[in-house]
Amino acid sequence: MTILDKYVLKQCFTSFLFFTIVLSLVAWINEAIELIESLARDGHMVATVVDLIALTIPKILIRVFPISAFAATVFTIIRLSNESELTVMLAAGLRPRQIVKPYFIFGLITTLFALSMSIYLAPQAEKLLSEKKFELSRAYASKFLKVGKFQHPSSGVTLFIRDISTNGELLDVFISDRRDDVFTYNYSAAKAYLLASENKAVFVLTNGVIQIHNADQNLLSLTNFDELTYDLSEAFEKNNEPQIGLGQLPTYLLWSDPISAMNAADKTLAQVLENFHSRIQNALLCLVATLIGFATLYAAGFSRYGRGRFVALAIFFLANVKIVESAVIDITRSNSSSWPLVYLPTLIGLSIFVIMIMFSEHKWKLKND
């Protein structure tokens, strides 16, 4: 590797780091807000979800890396052109295929980074995230301990807690149970205690009254009680095990034993194959984005129209690659033999690169003849 290659690589990676940080923060904040809101609605403290938010980072980086690689390549070429460094390279007789070398290495390295995220870190992080969210969902106490709000843990059940004392007593509790077609049960108590485990939620009500309304006979009966237990566990859907998604399964399992992966995630064979090859395709987009950015912006050096139009053209090329990627998803997920179509965006992107490089080579030869 020449000194020039190392210099260009340094410029690319510096820009890549900057764009990755900026774009990741934007995407991460949006992801974090949605996660915090969903868990806060279940009564969990924001502090308890910090580790969950961290587990979303690998998934975000997979989406950000191709865009960052493209932006870094375009920015580096524009900078080299503005400072006449690209002109010096051309004056030194370097051919386009020689100048592309450091950008190809840069795209290859970012692809390897993305590949490590996609095939190993992201599935592990998604699995841990699913397990932790499942554990939080089974924390029944957090579902009930919301002060001053009418809650509806299940259809036909309403719960209200006015306040919670420092020693854990629930003050002024009201429960309305309308799940029966004939009878409506309204419980009110001065104090209550919640006995909760991973799959049980039982209220111990003290010093209260039960109102039972019979809709058929239009009768209302009142019963005072000193102590009463009320089980609300049945109001919640019970899952003994967290649901397994394809994104949580290790890559080696998708490749070596797709039938087991299909049974574990309750998906079709086509969906398993699509998920496996998409993990590789997502990483290859880093190389494709880099080469498209280089070839298109490098061709601008031979045009009298300037670089602005070629930047827009590069974005247009990359957008079309993403459109093709979205278009083949439904096809590959419905037919197990169509998995090679997953790599169609990469083939199109490489074709664009070859065409633009051939254009630049042709202009280079004309200029030097």
Image: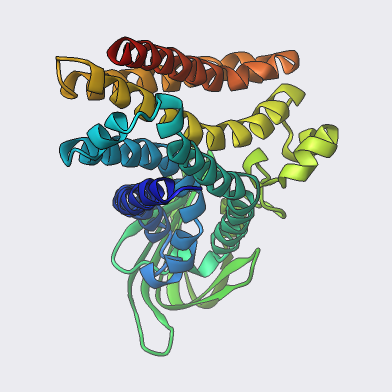
Let me know if residue 152 appears in the view.
yes
Let me know if residue 215 appears in the view.
no
Q: Residue furthest bottom?
A: 167
- The x, y position of residue 18, in whole percent, is 30, 53
Q: Quadrant of residue 136?
A: bottom right
- The x, y position of residue 266, in whole percent, is 74, 34
Please indicate whether residue 309 sits to the left or right of residue 321 in the image.
Answer: left
**Point 29% across, 41% down: residue:** 76
Q: Quadrant of the C terminus?
A: top left
* Above or below for 270 versus 176: above
Label total for image: 0
> Residue 17 versus residue 117: which sits nearer the camera?
17
**Point 28% across, 66% down: residue:** 148
- The x, y position of residue 47, in whole percent, is 39, 72
> Residue 97 versus residue 194: which sits nearer the camera?
97
> Residue 203 versus residue 52: which sits nearer the camera?
52
**Point 46% across, 26% down: residue:** 97
- The x, y position of residue 120, in whole percent, is 65, 51
Q: Residue furthest front?
A: 369
> Residue 306 versus residue 279: which sits nearer the camera?
306
Please indicate whether residue 305 sits to the left or right of residue 355 in the image.
Answer: left
Q: Quadrant of residue 270?
A: top right
Q: Quadrant of residue 296?
A: top left
**Point 36% across, 54% down: residue:** 17
* Above or below for 74 versus 310: below
Q: What colour scheme does the image use? A: rainbow
